[in-house]
Image (spheres, rainbow, N blue to C red):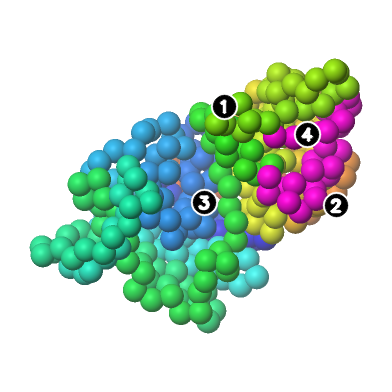
Amino acid sequence: MITAITITNFKGFQNLQIPTLSRITLLGGHNNVGKTSLLEALFLFHDRSNPAMFFQQLGFRGFPPITTTADKLCSPIFNNYDISKTIGISIVRNSPEQLSFALKTDNKKTLSHNVIKEENLQTTSDSNPSLILEIKYKKVGVEQTSHMTINAGEIKMEIKNGKNLSSASVARAIFLPSRIPINPQEEATRFGNVDVINKVDTIVNILKIIEPKLKGLSTIMIGTTPYIYADIGLNRKIPVRLLGDGVSRLLSIILAIADASGGIVLIDEVENGLHYSVMPIIWESIALAAKEFDCQIIATTHSYECLQSAYTGIGKTTENNFFTYIRLENDGNNIIPKTFNNKLLGIALSTNMEVR
């Protein structure tokens, strides 16, 4: 579990330091204060070996993949678009881990990754120097340096060294964006991963908190696309999405938590599609799933009702240090985090303090 994070020169953050993250952390604050950017930084940390990492980040914001150059594609992630700076993302898990991004000029043989056809990989060599993004990762006993170039629709990525590092050592991270519906096939894949480890009944029991009639879940192929169907005691199964936004949204969240067991789930605008009246039991369900699957959840919200519900729902099932609320504030020069543990948040809510 990540217990602290420091971000420098990433998007709106010159130097953001958050010394306390919990099993469940909820982020609040005004618009454009960096709540989603914080989630993106954490996901980028875990997605660092993905050649299409920046196209994926654009996708979270609702932008389609674009053909461009390294500086144009990467500059939006730099603070004030200043590509002369070095981005740093440092976390503390069991021990400190550091990741940095810096744009440099180099000419190296690289691995090509075609954006349009991701399965098309080839080795090539450029005759002219190109602008590259140097990605460095370090923790105790582990070092990795990668070079990435983007040109004419291709991403070229070379891992120069990967001392004592394997893909299996990277914790699983899943990002649930606020603007983009989850692909049914992706969700069905997560359901399949849960089914393989015989945890479907666990998911069903958690969902029963909000839908008591639910008896079971299964995947059914409609044409070439798999969908998740629910048995609620009728003479036929029905698509989960017909049970309402609450059940559908909760299932998406719980499946992500189960599929990221031992890792982290990042949820942007967690209250989307949920009525305030069901939010306490939604949070109770999320807390149960986080404990069951040993998963960390960091989510954003604009809703006071969501914050109140998180305090109420999570407090029913967990100890005080299981949940933290962080309000991001812009002091004119930098983004400042204000941290509320369960006790402080309870005091703030009981006195009607504005903490969103």
Give the magenta range: 192-219
User: Which mark is nearer the camera, 1 or 4?
Assistant: 1
Residue wearing tag 3 = 43
The residue lying at 29 percent from left, 46 percent from top is: 73
Q: Is residue 104 visible?
A: no
The residue lying at 28 percent from left, 60 percent from top is: 122
User: Which mark is nearer the camera, 3 or 1?
Assistant: 1
Camera-side residue of 243 and 17: 243
Q: Is residue 153 visible?
A: yes
Residue wearing tag 4 = 217
Confirm or deny contact between disc 4 and disc 3 (CB under 8 A).
no
With respect to residue 130, does 207 lie above or below? Answer: above
The location of residue 256, given as percent across then percent down, is: 66, 44
Q: Neighbour class for label 4 at 10 Å: few (<14), some, many (≥20)?
A: many
With respect to residue 152, does 217 lie above or below? Answer: above
The image quarter in which residue 317 lies? top right
Q: Neighbour class for label 3 at 10 Å: few (<14), some, many (≥20)?
A: many
Point out the tag, 3 or 1, that comes first from the N-terminus.
3
Q: Amino acid at mark 2?
A: Glu
Residue wearing tag 1 = 223
Confirm or deny contact between disc 3 and disc 1 (CB under 8 A).
no
Point out the tag, 4 or 3, that comes first from the N-terminus.
3
User: Which mark is nearer the camera, 2 or 3?
Assistant: 3
Q: Which mark is on residue 319?
A: 2
The location of residue 353, given as percent across then percent down, is: 71, 32
| Mark pair 1, 2: CA separation | 46 Å
